[in-house]
Structure formats: structure tokens, C-alpha cells
Image: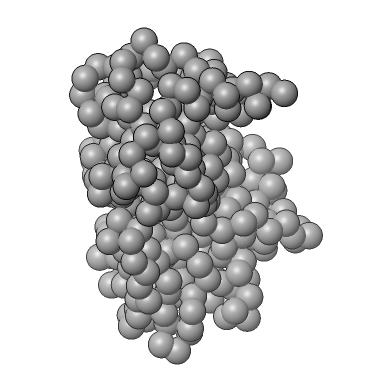
Amino acid sequence: MSVLVYTENWDGKFKKLSYELVSYAAGVAKMNGTSVTAVSVGRVEEAELKQLGNYGASKIISVTNENLSQLDSQAYAGVIAEVAAKEGSKVIIIANNNTGKAIAPRLSVRLKAGVGSGVSKLPVNHNPFTVYKRTYSGNAFAQLVIKSDIKILTLAQNSFDLVPSSNTATIENYTANVDGSTVKTSVTNVEKQTGKMLLTDADIVISGGRGMKSPDNWSPLVELADLLGGATACSRPVSDEGWRPHGEHTGQTGKIIAPNLYVAVGISGATQHLAGISSSKYIVAINSDKDAPIFESAQYGIVGDALKVLPKLVEAVKE
């Protein structure tokens, strides 16, 4: 009856997101008076697996199968469903990232489970089972009641603090029964970005919009991101104009991110853009228009010309 949490790994390594999921699962388990079982798919060293115990996992199931060497959402959903049935888990927790959004609905169908997507706090109530989440692009909050016997929750990134634990987790190796003919995903080529922080992994993001006026004015924004150990991003019009790479585009049609700090420089704050960054813990807006919508979502704001404000920020950080 343990709470089951799927912990995604990247080349055999866990990131902060995985530990955040386990911490959250431990909170749910404590409310239910049960324990946490973490499931990991793929080859991960024992020492790395044991790290999950440091955040509340009592048991770790390491699933291996040659047909699971590449992420295939249908195959992975089948494996997680198999483990959930084996463990008798009634609550399953997955990240609300691209992988989780692909796996959760497939898992829901297999287990006849209700889904609470993008939750950001521990359940409000257990009878009825009620979860808290943002809605309408972060402009409102909802309390969602899940009535099914099995519940699936996808946790919004950076919405739950890491909670260290003194657990000593046991590791169980499990060979999943996966039919290779059902795996439809194949990887023919891999190109990895190096020398630059991934936007989705960054705790600090400095983002620019049309208020930057020209691609030639981006240097202080990039410098500020480097000084703060963050990543750079942009609004859709900027990427459409070719000022910045499309991989930096954040918003409803770009990357959905949830950093601890998001600095919006010269971005007006259209609804489509806010949909991609509304889960940020803190938003700082810099805009010459005091009535720009971005200020309604920001905790801090500076009304001024971005090209004058940015150099002063860079100087202040250097000092």
C-alpha cells in the first residue's frame, strides 16, 4: 500500500527533480501512514539509487529490460502499472514534465485512475481526496477532488522543497516483462548541448522580450545570467524574429519552466507567455510600460528602460 513515485534518471543520474518527487511522496505517505517506494527504469548504479533514500524512499525498485533502453511512454506506463499492482499502490506520483505528461494519461487508462495534473502542494484532504493546483495559466487556483480508487498526481517542478531523510532504503532488482514488438520509439541520433545550462534545469532564468529592441543588445542579459549561474530565455516574438534560438522560447507554445527566479526583461506579459512561467517562485519584471500585464504576475518590478537597467544590475551583481 506504499506511495509509488517514478524517478526519472538522465544517463543513469538523478537530478533535483527526482529528489523533489521523493520528498513530496514522503509527505503524502506520512499523511497516509504508509511508506514510499521509488521505481527507477534503466541502468542506475546502486550508490545513485541509494540517494533516493536520503529524501524518504524506504524501498527502491530498479527495473531493467533491454527493451527499456530508450524512453517509450507506452512501455514505461506498462512497467509502472505492473509495479504499482505488485506493490498495491493507491497513489502514484510522477513529474509534471514532458515525460510525465506522456506517461500519466496512459497509466491512468491502464489503472482506471484519476489524474491530478500539475499539483503544487500536499493533498488538502484525504476523504474526499483533494489536491491543490494552479489553473488558467496560473491566474487562479483549484481544489481538485479525485474519486477513483487509485490516484495519479503529477507534481509541478520546483513547487516542493527537498526534505532530507535518514532512511536506509532497500533496493530490489526487478526484470519487467516487456514485449519488444510493442515498443514504437527508436533513437537514431543524439546531439547533446554542452557548455550551457539547460533551460528546464535552471533555478535562475533571465529572459528577454521585444523590449530589448535588437539582437545586438543581448550581451548584458547573457552576462547577468552567467554571473548568477542561470540560463537565458526569450519570448516567442524574439525567437520568431530570429534574435534568439527557438530552444530559449518560453511560454504556452514553448518551454514550460518553473525556476526559483525568473527575470522578465522587456516582456509585456501576454497570457501565452505567462502560461509557461507562472509556476516560477519569484518573478521580477523590468519594463518601461508601467501598465504592462507582466507586473500583475511579478513579485518585484522595475519601471524603466531595460537597456539602462540591465547594465546597472550587472554592475551590482559584480560588486
Residue 316 seen in the figure: yes
Q: Is residue 165 above or below residue 264?
A: below
Residue closest to the far right: 166
Please say if 283 is above or below 198: below
Q: Residue at (68%, 59%) from the top-left corner?
A: 163
- The residue at the far bottom in this view is 127
Q: Which of the 4 image quarters holds residue 203?
A: top right
What is the quadrant of the C terminus in the image?
A: top right
Percent across and percent down for residue 180 are: 29, 40
Question: Eyeballing the image, is 132 above or below 32?
Answer: above
Say which of 34 and 178 sits in front. 34
| Image quadrant where residue 276 sits | top left
Instruction: Say how the picture is coloured.
Output: one colour
Q: From this viewpoint, is residue 77 visible?
A: no
Q: Which residue occupies 42% across, 74% down?
A: 131
Q: Is residue 181 above or below residue 32?
A: above
How many marks do you count on the picture? 0
> Where's residue 22, x and y in %?
59, 57
Closer to the camera, 63 or 197?
197
Measured as percent of width and height from the top left, residue 263 is found at 47, 37
Q: Nearer the viewer, residue 223 or 103?
A: 223
From the viewer's side, name the closer residue of 32 and 171. Answer: 32
- Report which quarter residue 229 is drawn in: top right
Residue 65 in the figure: left or right of residue 145? right
Which residue occupies 35% across, 72% down?
Answer: 142
